[in-house]
Amino acid sequence: MSVSGNFNRRSSRRTSGRNGVSGPERSLGAMSKNVKELTELLSSVTTFGYRTAAGIGGLATFAYLRLINFFPSGMTPGEVLFFLFIAFAFAITYLLVIGYGAFSTLWLVKACTSFRNVVSFDDAALVSRLFSDQGAPETWRSVFRDRWHGVRIRATRARIDNLYAVPVSAQGWFLGLCSLFVFVYFVLSVIEFDSVPFTQLMFAMTFAGFVALFFASVRPESGSRASHRARFIGLALAPIIVLLFYAGPRPLLNMVFGGLGIYVPNVSLELPASELDVIERISEHIDRPLVDCHRPSPAMILVHGADILWTGVGDQTVIRFSAIDTTKRTIFSSAPELRQVQLKFDTKSLRIIKTAPRIDPCFNLSSDPLFKNSDAVLTAEGIRRLRSLVDTVKKFGKPVKIAVRAHSDARSEIAASSKAPISDQMLSQQRALAVAKSLGSLLNDKAVDIVSEGVGSREMRNKCEPDAKLSPYELNVCNKANRRVEVNVEYRK
């Protein structure tokens, strides 16, 4: 019996070696299969993510170019590669935005899941409800009760099917508490910044994150590949629709292009002096000062408050000047129609100046709209222009000192009150004082130190000789640049 038993065991081991696999070999084979399946899954997800990123980046880039009505030209091969890299920049930004938004609403999804579990029936109550008598007379109380019970039955079915459950990796009270902290931080940031575009972006970010988390939490009843594919596409596309179409393209597009250095808002520029007339006409059109009093060189002018819409890719730079928006908006109000001017320059002909802290501007105002001839009393148009100047000053920062310097030409003036000649020095002093007093009342901030100085004709910009062969009109145009008021603003550093 012993020999037979040993023989049977040896035969069994030989049969197992020929026809089957041992325990360790079976485990190794299962592990290899799992690794292969995981590799294939990661490969498919990477391919889908690459294509999705390229699609998102391409659509977003062309949407931005369509928004500014410009398409770059004269790109080098390196700039073409950088142009394609923008797609991946949008993909990374999209994932970060959706990730933060989803995490900030995790506590809400947990609360919804807890509410579902609370209102759902237990086993005995569910059986009693399903087989209870429905023959009672219908009243408003019974209708309400029936609808409430219907909600509870749907919640019970969702709990049994494990629908709308928080993913296993996101469960636990600690993550829910951290999620609530991030959500509160978003709300406090919105209150602190008090910016409608920022509020719209934060709202769309949290809502899109909630939608993404909702799709990730759904457990489809069918395990087919089509249902999983539909769930994944919905998870990827629903927040994109929310971000691009609810919040508007500008907040997200400007954020990405700003990070790449293509979009640069509210900066100073050095432009050729030949563009001075065009910039002054734009300043009149949008009703805000743009040209600085000081010139970097005789051939260049300094311009403030420019929004660079496109630069660094191609041979052209797109610049936009806009009027100051002083209207108080809410998150649901539409953006006001502001006067805007868009220009294209050769990238090599200009310089973009970005400093920290910002350059203290010196705004240049023509005296002709501010005062009547030989008068130091501000006109109604002059007060309106100073109000526009104050709005521009407030946009740049918190001013601490303002120095007003009034200039005049070299011609003799006749005082409007006494009909007697008045020196250009005296007239410039009176005009500087009038502008300083008006700025003080418009700013209404006693912490701002405002001083005035009359320069007279000591610092003329143009030399206009009366005995030259100039007509009265040409002489007046020549002296117009000399009759000016300079407002130097120093900001808190």
Image (spheres, rainbow, N blue to C red):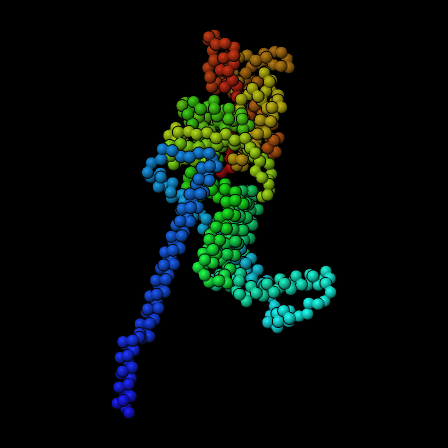
Question: Which residue is pictured at 56% across the width and 62% down the height?
Answer: 113
Q: Nearer the viewer, residue 44 or 133?
A: 133
Question: Which residue is pictured at 42% across the width and 27% down the height?
Answer: 271
Q: Nearer the viewer, residue 261 or 169?
A: 169
Residue that lies at the very extreme toward the front in this rendered image: 135
Q: How many marks?
A: 0
Q: Quadrant of the N terminus?
A: bottom left
Residue that lies at the very extreme toward the bottom in this rendered image: 1
Quadrant hosting residue 327: top right
Position of residue 230 relative to residue 149, above or below, is above
**Percent x, y of residue 238:** 50, 51
**Percent x, y of residue 229:** 45, 56
Quadrant hosting residue 315: top left
Q: Is residue 249 visible?
A: yes
Question: Which residue is pictured at 35% across the width and 63% down the height?
Answer: 35
**Percent x, y of residue 153:** 61, 65
**Percent x, y of residue 280:** 50, 24
Position of residue 199 relative to residue 441, above or below, is below
Q: Is residue 358 visible?
A: no
Position of residue 476 relative to residue 393, above or below, is above
Quadrant hosting residue 127: bottom right
Question: Which residue is pictured at 50% across the width and 47% down the height?
Answer: 241
Q: Nearer the viewer, residue 297 or 73?
A: 73
Position of residue 313 relative to residue 277, above or below, is below
Q: Nearer the viewer, residue 201 or 238?
A: 238
